[in-house]
């Protein structure tokens, strides 16, 4: 790297809105360690979870649990800024400003809003609608270059780019325009019971594998995963969504393509496929769970880490926010 070349900034976050799933792990979490030469921020985006009603005690517990999981998955908290969104007020402050630079029509097109409105028809709140603006603020506050996400979040990164370009068009180069980073093979893991739907942490337990599931639960859930009746192990997401989903999981964990994973098992039955997936998941998760238990045993150490890193994030976020306030004409003392 040239001496004066700016290091890239990576930002991503996960909501503590349920038990972290195999989908969150394959689509996002495990890709977070792919940027050794960048300045990385990994946020527990707790404010986002309030768009759906949460049990307060559960939310608090899941927030520290997710921070511990970040570290357990290999992110060194001295090298990466691991923190909690609500500990850095600039996220909510910038969101207000950017709300005033985002059109209703743009937000109306967001598929996540449509999906979540259908799922929570009794609570279609304004926060659910403006969720992408808060996400844009998360990203833009840190002058982020790269956003590692699963494919379901691509549309939100695109609207973030649009908002940033619109703002820069009026006020000059205030924000870096971010790029999504989506690993093709692992972009979308589907539900075990309804393999045409995304695996989601806020869905019922038997639809997903949680990163903290016990081996016997992993085995049971995969055993019950929906397949089909034709009996051939072949990667064909359109006609064989269940089998293809299992192949995607296996391939992602073994760094193969789904076709390669299918070739290894060719001629065998679905029992063998499920056995292979179970072994791969348990092998991957066991060391993470061991580290997680160690980290969680030192609650004070975990809290101190979160406090230290929130201060670092706050310092960076304030720099951008001051610039934004000045540009839009807010009087500052
Ligand atoms: N099934 C999935 N396959 C691949 N990637 C996935 N991600 C989520 N589900 C899958 C990725 O995980 C990251 C964290 O997502 P989030 O917590 O911010 O929100 P989400 O996308 O809405 O995740 P969930 O699990 O579906 O949460 P709920 O149920 O609360 O809505 C993102 O990078 C996402 O792409």
Image: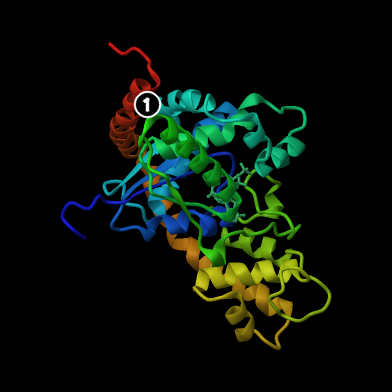
Residue drawn at point x = 75 percent, y = 68 percent = 238
Image point 69% across, 70% down: which residue? Answer: 244
Element type where label 1 sits in the image? helix
Q: Position of residue 141 (x, y in %)?
A: 38, 35
Residue designated by label 1: 324
In the rendered image, residue 23, in percent from the top left (x then y), is placed at 58, 56
Q: Nearer the viewer, residue 156 or 163?
A: 163
- Disc 1 under 8 Å from ligand 1? The reply is no
Q: Quadrant of residue 333?
A: top left
Residue at the limit of the structure toward the left, as seen here: 3
Residue plotted at (48% across, 35% down): 166
When the figure is inspected, residue 249 is found, relative to residue 71, above or below; the finding is: below
Q: Give neighbour class at mark 1: few <14, some 14-19, many 20+ (Cα, 10 Å).
A: many
Q: Is residue 331 above or below residue 89?
A: above
Q: Is residue 3 left or right of residue 48?
A: left
Tell which of 105 and 282 is nearer to you.
105
Q: Does residue 181 show up?
A: yes
Q: Which quadrant does the N terminus fall into?
A: bottom left
* Badge count: 1
Q: Residue at x 53, y 60 (%)?
A: 26
In the depicted structure, whether residue 69 falls above or below residue 136: below
């Amino acid at each position: 790297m040239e001496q004066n070349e700016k290091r890239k900034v990576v930002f991503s976050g996960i909501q503590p809105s349920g038990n972290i799933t195999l989908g969150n792990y394959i689509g996002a979490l495990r890709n977070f360690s792919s940027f050794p030469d960048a300045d990385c921020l990994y946020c527990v985006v707790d404010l986002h979870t309030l768009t759906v009603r949460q049990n307060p005690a559960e939310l608090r517990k899941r927030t520290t649990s997710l921070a511990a999981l970040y570290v357990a998955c290999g992110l060194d908290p001295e090298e990466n800024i691991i923190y909690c969104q609500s500990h850095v007020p600039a996220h909510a402050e910038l969101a207000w400003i950017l709300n005033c630079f985002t059109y209703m029509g743009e937000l109306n097109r967001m598929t996540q809003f449509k999906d979540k409105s259908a799922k929570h028809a009794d609570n279609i709140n304004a926060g659910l609608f403006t969720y992408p603006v808060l996400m844009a603020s998360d990203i833009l506050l840190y002058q982020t270059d790269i956003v590692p996400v699963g494919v379901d979040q691509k549309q939100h990164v695109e609207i973030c780019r649009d908002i940033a370009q619109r703002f820069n068009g009026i006020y000059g180069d205030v924000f870096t325009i971010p790029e999504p980073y989506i690993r093709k093979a692992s972009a979308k893991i589907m539900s075990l019971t309804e393999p045409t739907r995304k695996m989601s942490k806020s869905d019922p337990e038997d639809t997903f594998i949680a990163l903290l599931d016990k081996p016997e639960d992993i085995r049971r859930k995969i055993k019950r995963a929906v397949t089909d009746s034709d009996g051939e192990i072949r990667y064909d997401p359109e006609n064989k969504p269940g089998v293809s989903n299992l192949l995607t999981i296996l391939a992602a964990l073994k760094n193969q393509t789904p076709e390669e994973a299918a070739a290894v098992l060719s001629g065998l039955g679905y029992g063998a496929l499920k056995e292979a997936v179970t072994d791969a998941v348990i092998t991957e998760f066991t060391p993470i769970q061991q580290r997680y238990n160690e980290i969680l045993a030192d609650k004070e150490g975990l809290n101190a880490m979160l406090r230290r890193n929130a201060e670092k994030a706050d310092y960076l976020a304030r720099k951008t926010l001051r610039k934004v306030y000045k540009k839009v004409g807010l009087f500052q003392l």
